[in-house]
Amino acid sequence: MRIALGVLVAIVAVLVLAQLLLPGIAADRVRARVEKYGTVKSVTVKAWPAVELLWGRAESVKVTAGSLQMSPAQSAKLLWEARGVETMTMAAASVKEGPLRLHDASFQKHGNALEGQAWTARTDVKAALGEGFEVQLLNSSAGQVEVRAAGGLFGVRTSVDAVARAQEGKLVVHPLGFLLGGLQLTLFANPHVRVEGVGASAIQGPGAVAGYRLTMRASLR
């Protein structure tokens, strides 16, 4: 009986220590991963029982960041690493995703469902597209975005309408028109992240469009 009681006390002590120590250790690991891409202000990890963290599972993770810079592939890698987290929220004051800078970016994960939103200024869009190119938002509904892209090529200025949408889990752009309708450009594709829809709305500034609010729905697979 004394041996059984001693074993039980030892197990309880280990579980209590794990509950006290493991969330902090896990938060430090999350911070180290995100800090590869910029500044991190705070990280909170919750799990019950905390020993689940040893198998990469957690109830919730909350990350608050300052300025981040990463590629779409690096973003997808972070999401896949968090696949064992039931609920995850992440907010950053600024994120440079590839060539495009985003502001007030936020992201939520519930199970395998993913949602993200941010806004970008017209100046950020122009900087990402390059000199002489611009884009105008025409419409956004049913998980897709229609835009008009204009620019010069070999001294000739032209414009084309296109639709960005989810297709077979990828984010693709289809030019509209009889001659260009068969073309397709893939903007994002990853074996672990399935894009389900995108959205955009104009942010009005003094006398003109100041920027765009962007949203995306996706899921882990």
Image (cartoon, helix red, strand yellow):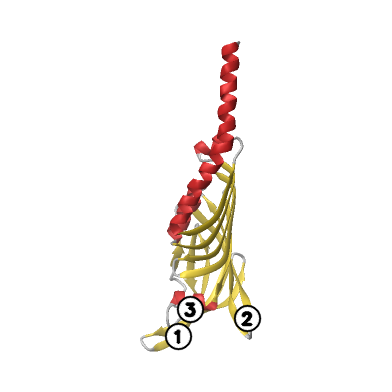
- On the image, the x and y values in percent for residue 1 come to 60, 10
Who's the residue at 46% across and 77% down the image? Answer: 127
Who's the residue at 43% across and 56% down the image? Answer: 36
For the residues labelled 1 and 3, the Cα–Cα distance comes to 16 Å
- On the image, the x and y values in percent for residue 218 come to 55, 56
- State how many labels appear: 3
Q: Is the residue 221 above or below the residue 205 in the image?
A: above
Whichever of labels 1 and 3 marks the residue nearer the N terminus, that label is 3
For the residues labelled 1 and 2, the Cα–Cα distance comes to 26 Å
Mark identifier at residue 126: 3
Q: Type of residue at label 2?
A: Gly
Residue on which the image places disc 1: 158
For the residues labelled 3 and 2, the Cα–Cα distance comes to 16 Å
Tell me the crowding category of disc 1: few under 14, some 14 to 19, or many 20 or more residues within 10 angstroms, Cα based: few
Whichever of labels 1 and 2 marks the residue nearer the N terminus, that label is 1
Secondary structure, mark 2, is strand
Whichever of labels 3 and 2 marks the residue nearer the N terminus, that label is 3
Residue on which the image places disc 2: 205
- On the image, the x and y values in percent for residue 207 come to 63, 86
- On the image, the x and y values in percent for residue 66 come to 53, 62
Between disc 1 and disc 3, the foreground one is 3
Who's the residue at 59% across and 20% down the image? Answer: 8
Tell me the crowding category of disc 3: few under 14, some 14 to 19, or many 20 or more residues within 10 angstroms, Cα based: some
Between disc 1 and disc 2, the foreground one is 2
Q: Nearer the viewer, residue 164 or 215?
A: 215
Q: Type of residue at label 3?
A: Lys
Q: Can residue 60 be seen in this view?
A: yes
Q: Is the residue 30 above or below the residue 158 in the image?
A: above
Who's the residue at 50% across and 52% down the image? Answer: 79
Q: Type of residue at label 1?
A: Thr
